[in-house]
Image: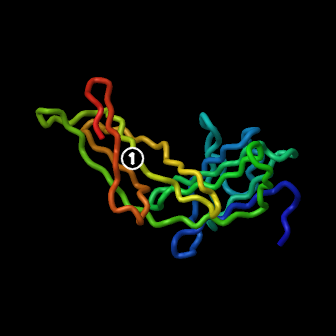
Amino acid sequence: VPRPEGQFELVVRGPDGQPVPQAMVEVRTKPALTVEQVLVGEYVRSATYGSFVRTDADGRLVLQLAEEQPQRFNLSIPTEGYGPYRAGVSTVKHPQTIPSRFVAELEAGWSVGGVVVDAQGQPIAGVRVKPSIKFKKRPGDLDALHVGTQVTTDAEGRWRFDSVPASKSEVFVVIGHPDYKPRR
């Protein structure tokens, strides 16, 4: 079914081919996405580099793009239980057209976590833990991009990250706190 001019449809599917309902999607575009541009799905909030939206119950998101093609259009899908996914088009570096429809096939994910303690074995709250995870990308995208996510330990020193791709058997993390030496 053809879509009206300027509309973009994203369909998010899991590894089983089934839709991923309420998948979180960060849309980085210039000009920035507005609430009114989300035709199917839900606008959640604006952020430093873009806007966060959710797919509907059928894993769909439909956006009305600005009249002029955006200079950049990047989608990242950081949804718990799945490995992170990124699809981007830059019209600045290379003349590319934003497709009217894209299907993102997410990889299954697993969780990792732990407890950060000091030399005496006492838990440390407020520690930043940054997992080193690469995005799964759209076919043809050769950029080596890592997720910029960080989690913070709670009062018991616990942390958890729920989007490690199933294809990864281990995860490296950077652990940092202003009162302690950083660790990898």
Is residue 129 rendered to the left or right of residue 17? left
Q: Nearer the viewer, residue 45 or 161?
A: 161
Q: How is the image coloured?
A: rainbow
Q: Quadrant of the N terminus?
A: bottom right
Residue drawn 30% across the image and 41% down it: 184
Image-based side of 109 in relation to 41, left or right: left
Give the residue type that dot 1 points to: Pro
Q: Is residue 117 above or below residue 15?
A: above
* Image height of 19 relative to 29, above or below: below
Lateral position of residue 76 relative to residue 90, left or right: left
Look at the numbered disc 1 and give the secondary structure of its residue.
strand
Q: Nearer the viewer, residue 55 or 106?
A: 106
Question: Among all residues in the image, which is located at the extreme top?
Answer: 179
Q: Quadrant of residue 124?
A: top left
Q: Could you tell me which residue is drawn at 53 percent across and 51 percent down?
A: 144
Q: Residue furthest left?
A: 120
Residue at 27 percent of width and 24 percent of height: 179
Image position, residue 172 (x, y; %): 34, 49
Q: In the image, 35: left or right of 154? A: right
Depicted 70 relative to depicted 58: above or below: above
Residue 133: x and y, percent? 44, 51
Question: Residue 121: x percent and y percent?
Answer: 13, 37
Q: Where does label 1 land, which residue?
A: 131
- Residue 10 x, y percent position in the rendering: 69, 61
Which residue lies at the image location 72% right of the left edge and 39% below the top edge?
A: 32
Q: How many discs appear?
A: 1
Local crowd size for mark 1, using a 10 Å CA cut-off: few (<14), some (14–19), many (≥20)? many
